[in-house]
Amino acid sequence: MNLMMISLKLLLFMNLSIIIITCKANPNQQGQPEGVDFDQYAGYITLDANKGKALFYYFVESPQNSSTNPLLLWLNGGPGCSSLGFGAMEELGPFRINSDGRTLYRNPYAWNNVANVIFLESPAGVGFSYSKTSSDYAKIGDSITALDSYTFLVKWLERFPHYKTRDFFITGESYAGHYVPQLAHTILSYNNIAASNHQTVINLKGIAVGNGWIDDNLCTKGMYDYYWSHALSSDESHSGIEKNCDYVSGNFSNECIKYMNMADVEVGDIDIYNIYAPLCDSSSSSKSPGNDFDPCSDHYTKSYLNLPEVQKALHAKATNWSSCSLVGWTDSPASILPTINRLISSNISIWIYSGDTDGRVPITSSRYSINALKLPVQTPWRSWYSANQVGGYVVGYKGLTLVTVRGAGHTVPSYQPQRALTMISYFLNGELPPKN
Amino acid sequence: MNLMMISLKLLLFMNLSIIIITCKANPNQQGQPEGVDFDQYAGYITLDANKGKALFYYFVESPQNSSTNPLLLWLNGGPGCSSLGFGAMEELGPFRINSDGRTLYRNPYAWNNVANVIFLESPAGVGFSYSKTSSDYAKIGDSITALDSYTFLVKWLERFPHYKTRDFFITGESYAGHYVPQLAHTILSYNNIAASNHQTVINLKGIAVGNGWIDDNLCTKGMYDYYWSHALSSDESHSGIEKNCDYVSGNFSNECIKYMNMADVEVGDIDIYNIYAPLCDSSSSSKSPGNDFDPCSDHYTKSYLNLPEVQKALHAKATNWSSCSLVGWTDSPASILPTINRLISSNISIWIYSGDTDGRVPITSSRYSINALKLPVQTPWRSWYSANQVGGYVVGYKGLTLVTVRGAGHTVPSYQPQRALTMISYFLNGELPPKN
């Protein structure tokens, strides 16, 4: 279903800048507060020296139990958006950026409290990642992203060999609903070859996909149903969509598209990635750092990551960094459900989680996608707790777990950092989130 | 449909205390901040001196334009809950109560900015309102409430005669979805008699019902659909309800009730009146006064209104005040839609509004109820604005307007005070809320 894919891409795509690389360890992150008690690394892994293709990462170890905590890879979606700009600086990273766009403050609910976390800018062309061979950009898509991310991991483990046997998890959100299962599948496929060649076997234990774009048709249906059930659109557009849109074939008639467009207009100018959040409004003062996510954070991130001293500290040469890049995408399967099905039979842990106030890839989309797998329920729907409050809901299927995060938008750890940390802690421990 | 009515009542009913009355004007509200720039009145209107039946009110005039601003009556629901304890002290009144339970702070978005507001504790038996004739409590229900509230208004206007010809509006929420249309209908009926007898004609211009319980069956259907679409309940309970519950007849089978109960349990321990809000948690510090509504406000209100000096300032004798009372309710029509239909033909302004994060009487319930009226759409669904953000959505039907308030729970002005004030200002001006 091309319609939504196009809008998904157009929404996030911006211009691309290419930079020259260098790679060192232990950056002193510019503008960070006093008392940082963990190690940080940033730089490049060269995938192909001939082509000059390299991926940028930011790696944060745990303040405590770093030598035993698992290794976790975080991937943002888009496709073409930066895990550094979103995941690291606005979601689950150890710091967030103050409204001055220059200084950082500590995120008490950073995921490096429970894991050693790699933020990867992927594929080449995103953020600080690049290729010197311009033809590389002509074939960017899901396949290259999965393969290059796998190559990155193998080479990264050569640089950090003490992590080779560590429990490894892949997490990500949005279009990473493609990236995460595809990378997991690539790892499991290559692990067999690597094992027989005495090469690095990646110790993959599980994946967690947040508000993931899993199936074009079912996610689109979930989105318009969410609009209507959350009182963002009219009865007229909803019944028009119900009547005219064929989500089985995905061949949408002009009449169907007319009503989809009508619903899109009716929603109006809200942050569809968190339907109750304010938009960044330059006329009002921005929020102080705290529990409430500042809606202007994207601006602070762009300012911060474009400071020459920050790029230097991160071992990235001067460049015009932007949060999302790439304007072409050569391959994108209409559904990632077959991949998920294959992963289920491999017995790794699979969690689909969803912030329930996201309208772009909403909880309805995740539910419809999972339902299509027709998995039997093993643990019935129940609430789970974080800090004495219901953090959301969980239902365990055979081979897959669905977890919701109450009051969280598309970027779950931005809006509910404490609940997100509780959730990921239990995921990494192989347990369902707590009953009370 | 008795099931829901019972649960609605049980949920809110508490013990009742009866007090001796007195009635004076101009209380100096105990614990209020400096610089109060409007007049306040509190006390009783005796409905029946022989029976010793009297209703308690708290009246706040506007700081500016009080002599031209309209007169607005606010009614809380329950049935049996206090407009003083909820509406005045936690929603749209000029003050809210600090966590000390003794002092007040100013609500900058109080509705007396745009209207002179009466908060009425109704019927007798609620809050400070009482009857000395205990048999009065045996026949409490919708009819008595409407009739006594009408009698209250006529007598109140004798005490404040300069308001007799003022534009008059009735507002309220929840079970006031019964009270407000019924009182409006009572006023219009008696106005004809009053006019011919040269008695007081109440200048009723419009009504606004918030998250109103309008139709037992459609509101119940709306509630369970909201649970499911907002990811509070499972696919299993939802399909069980869909299959087994007959919302046309309202005769619910045991199988239907089994799945309703299942959904109720699945939702777990959240504030169903605002599904994303925290519960009052005595283990964590309560919020500071500000934009975020303190979930422990009910406790502060109970403390405050039970202070002897406060009861004295309000001209209410010492009593054990509680927010909700009454354990029996003799009459409650299954649907208030016929009453609303009659009001539509009287040409008063009718607004149904809804905070969209309320799960108890959700926006789905309001939409289903309005849809049953089969009114043609005159102004298509669109967003409206307050303080540069989308405040919610509005759709204009012939004779009735639906307005949603984005991010607001059951008690709309508690959670979105600025948006609620914008909305009510436009309502009082006879205009739809603004397009930008």
Image (spheres, coloured by chain):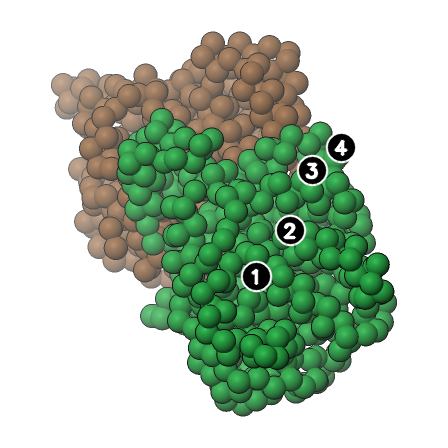
Chain colours: A green, B brown
The location of residue B13, given as percent across then percent down, is 59, 29
> Could you give the CA–CA distance between mark 4 and mark 3, rounded to whole angstroms?
8 Å
Q: Nearer the viewer, mark 3 or mark 2?
A: 2
**Location of residue B83 by image quarter:** top left
Observer-nearest of A89 and A142: A142
Q: Nearer the viewer, mark 1 or mark 3?
A: 1
Compute the Cα span from label 2 to label 4: 22 Å
* Residue located beneath label 1 in the image: A144
- In primary-sequence order, the first of circles 3 and 2 is 2
Horizontal side of A165 relative to A171 (left or right) equals right
| Secondary element at image label 1 | helix
Q: Amino acid at mark 3?
A: Val
Which numbered disc covers residue A181? 2
On the same chain: label 2 and label 1?
A: yes
Residue drawn at 32 percent across, 60 percent down: B388
Chain ID at mark 2: A
Q: Which label number is shown at residue A395? A: 3
- Please give the chain letter of the residue carrying mark 4: A
The amino acid on which the numbered mark 1 sits, given as a three-letter code, is Ile
Question: Upstream in the sequence, badge 2 or badge 4?
Answer: 2
